Amino acid sequence: MESDYIIEDTDIRRLIVKAVEARDMAYARYSQFKVGAALLAGRENSSDATEVVGGETDSHDRNTNEYRVFTGCNIENSSYGATICAERAAVCNAVSSGYKDFKAIAIVGGLNSTGINGITYPCGICRQVLSEFSADMYVIAARSEDDYDMRRLSEFLPASFGAGQME
């Protein structure tokens, strides 16, 4: 079932800017590949949306539908399996604040020496984690506010394993 949510150009640009800001916070000691993500999420019960719990926010991080932007960056670890991707860090930030209605995520990445010079797509684990909440959310893989690839998550992860298989 495809979502009827349509993302506005202003939200796309705002998510990309927030992802670039989050990238600056990345801990990429081993790969030197910094990634930032910005997730547009709302509460499943919109009557709770006026209360903001946890995470950073300002008045520009909410749109008229009471959605918030949650950011994340990659956090590497010498035990590579313990590394956290930027997308999953943003998901943890949103969920721990009570926001599980995901509409879009912007991702930017690149080597420290070159900055953001290419498109960075979510890895397989991140695609699976995101699909737990919405296979129809938008994924915006960006070089800049004007240069990005945007698709529905279901295009990146067709026939994904989900809650339906657990019932």
Image (cartoon, grey):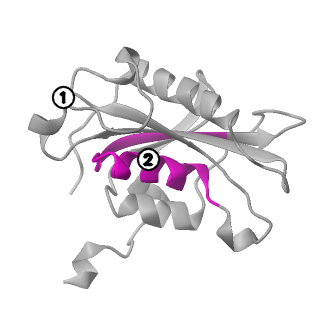
Lateral position of residue 65 relative to residue 47, left or right: right
Against 8, is 143 above or below?
Answer: below
Against 60, is 19 above or below?
Answer: below
Is 86 in the magenta?
yes
Sequence-wise, the earlier of marks 1 and 2 is 1
Q: Looking at the image, which is closer to me, 111 or 71?
A: 71
Against 157, is 70 above or below?
Answer: above
Dot 1: within a 10 Å radius of its alpha carbon, few (fewer than 14), some, or many (20 or more) residues?
A: few
- Label at residue 162: none
Residue at the spot 36% in from the left edge and 51% down from the top edge: 96
Q: Measured from the top left, where is residue 102 in percent x and y?
A: 32, 46
Circle 1 is placed at which residue position?
50
* The furthest residue to the front: 54
* Amino acid at circle 2: Asn
- Is residue 157 visible in the rendered image? The answer is no
Q: Measured from the top left, where is residue 38 in percent x and y?
A: 50, 37
* Amino acid at circle 1: Thr
Residue at the spot 52% in from the left edge and 60% down from the top edge: 126
Circle 2 is placed at which residue position?
93
Q: Measured from the top left, where is residue 141 in percent x and y?
A: 58, 41
* The furthest residue to the right: 113
Q: Looking at the image, which is closer to me, 94 or 5?
A: 94
What is the quadrant of the N terminus in the image? Answer: bottom left
